[in-house]
Image: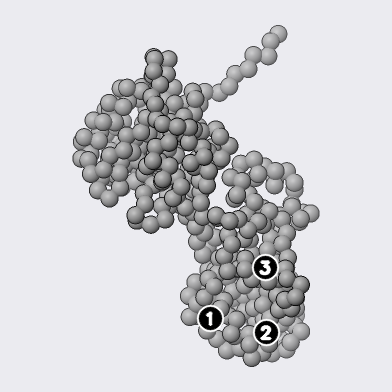
Amino acid sequence: MLVAGRRFGKTKAAVNEIIRAAIRKPGSLNWWVAPTFSITRKGWRELFAFLPAELIADISRTEVMVELINGSSIWFKSADNPDSLLSEGLDFVVVDEAARVSEEAWGRALRPALTDRLGRAAFTTTPAGKNWLYRLWLRGQDSLDSEVASWRFATGDNPHIPRGEIEAAQRTMVERYFRQEYLAAFEDDVGAVFPQARRQATGALEEPRGQALLGGQECVIGVDWGKHQDASVFLTLDVARNTVVALDRQLQVDYTLQMGRLAALVERWQPRIVVAEMNSAGDPLVEQLRRDLPCPVEGFLTTATSKRVLIDSLALAIERGDLTYPDVPELIGELEAFRYELTAAGNVRYAAPTERYHDDCVMALALAWHGASHTRPPVVRWLGD
């Protein structure tokens, strides 16, 4: 089992292992299994970079299979449906990105297929928390367990990766993501996006007094729309101090009334910009805000990609102490409950864990931070004569 950071060379190592297995045992059946077919494509491409052409008897791109002149075959399979992996006996199997393959796929389908032929398995992966694969990896660290051997390497252990690239990633990534993706660390609460949420709270919400902090283009308002199941949240961020100074959370309120409450907030705080979600119902609301409000309004279209960038930026700001917020139960609760999960394709998906939880405050805070980060004036330093 090879557990290593991104770009370490796991795929190349596994390709060479499966080629060796197919050559050593004529007539052998060898599988390459990944969480999805899209992930198998990398292994498929790498295979032909290392497999000598004179050893190939046939290639089936339809079945994603290569047959060698000695009768061995190498098949590429997806683990997204464990039932599709029920098979005759296997001689060798590579489980690529194994931490994202279900325990059912390994335990119910692949492991039993190795039994009658005394087959072997090679796992390559980057960690994804302390799941079933972590427990198997621990067996490989036990000198008395002769069935499993395991190794762990950081991305930097590959001498071909420039150190500057790793250092740049560390400066721009949340620490636990960096530890997992580059240091190949098995993190405890891998699903928590804001593990220090409560510790970073500064106390009760107290709006600042005096005109120095009211208006003057020093605030940003983040808007996350809701009406029935979800709440609408209008969150005001004081850009000068990077702290939340007002939070208006409302449930089952008509959009006309919501617009009025938002207009009152704008009049009160005179923000430099309002950043509002524009998905579904938010699109026409953003257009109305642009007509009615005296300040600029930015519509934010939330997609899987844009949400990841948005939340990563917020998580990094909270982790580094660049952003503070009051101990508002709804906000703290949502931050603590907010999770991420890795899809079978290896992508990150952010959301509240179940329908019982919401992420409206989190999204409003993230939108406000996005507005503050993208509208700050440049820092001018006088260098003298």
Q: Nearer the viewer, residue 152 or 304?
A: 152
The CA distance from mark 1 to mark 2 is 15 Å
| Circle 3 or circle 2, nearest the eye | 3
Give the residue at x 71% y 56%: 154
Q: Amino acid at mark 2?
A: Gly
Q: Residues within 10 Å of mark 2 (few under 14, many from 20)?
A: some
What's the mark number on residue 119? 2
Relative to residue 79, is residue 114 drawn left or right?
right
Task: Check if mark 1's residue and mark 2's residue have beta carbons within 8 Å.
Answer: no
What's the mark number on residue 108? 1
- Label 3 vs 2, first from the N-terminus: 2
Q: In the picture shown, does residue 271 fall above or below 122?
A: above
As drawn, the residue found furthest toward the top would be: 385
Q: Amino acid at mark 1?
A: Arg
- Label 1 vs 2, first from the N-terminus: 1
Q: In the picture shown, does residue 25 fall above or below 382?
A: below
Residue 206 percent across, percent down from the top left: 39, 26
Dividing the picture into quarters, in which one does residue 209 lie? top left
Give the residue at x 65% y 56%: 185
For mark 3, give the secondary structure.
Answer: helix
